[in-house]
Image (spheres, grey):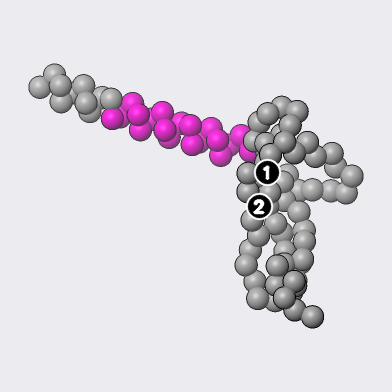
Amino acid sequence: MNMQTLLIATALACTAVAGFAQANETSSSQAVPYHYGMPLHVGKVISMTEPSTLDCQVVTANMKYVDSVSGKPAEITYLKFSDACSYQN
């Protein structure tokens, strides 16, 4: 009986820690819109995403990176031509 209680308590504690870590990660990085001349201290790019489209158009892309000054993850949004523009004349 004691072993079962210990296992349940351990499982609940692990779930709580994992949930807290995920909530902490998502709340710490808010995407900031890029403006011309804004200093970026990109140490390492984590991911670059954009909405997929078949038309050549301007889309809002997203870049997640590690800030080289603070060492913390950061996120920025910016406008760019979609990847479809590379394949159309």
Real-space CA distance between mark 1 and mark 2, rounded to the nearest whole angstrom: 8 Å
Secondary structure state at the residue bearing disc 1: strand
Image quadrant where residue 46 sits: top right
Relative placement, left or right, of 1 versus 41 is: left
Residue 73 percent coordinates (x, y): 64, 35
Location of residue 24 in the rendering, given as x and y in whole percent from the top left corner = 53, 32
* Residue 4 sits above or below residue 23 on the image: above
Up-down relation of residue 39 to residue 62 (above or below): above
Residue sitting at x 77%, y 58% = 79
- The overriding secondary structure of the stretch rendered in magenta is helix
Which span is picked out in magenta?
Answer: 11-31
Q: Which residue is mark 1?
A: 45
Q: From this viewpoint, is residue 64 visible?
A: yes
Which residue of the protein is positioned furthest toward the left in this rendering? 1
Q: Amino acid at mark 2?
A: Met
The amino acid type, in three-letter code, at marker 1 is Val
Q: Is residue 13 above or below residue 77?
A: above
Using the image, tell me which numbered label, if any, was put on residue 71: none
Residue 26 lies within the magenta run:
yes
Is disc 2 placed on a helix, strand or loop? Answer: strand
| Marks 1 and 2 close (CB-CB < 8 Å) | yes
Give the quarter of the figure containing the C terminus: bottom right
- Residue behind mark 2: 48
Image location (x, y in percent) of residue 55 = 70, 76
Residue 22 shown left or right of residue 27 in the figure: left
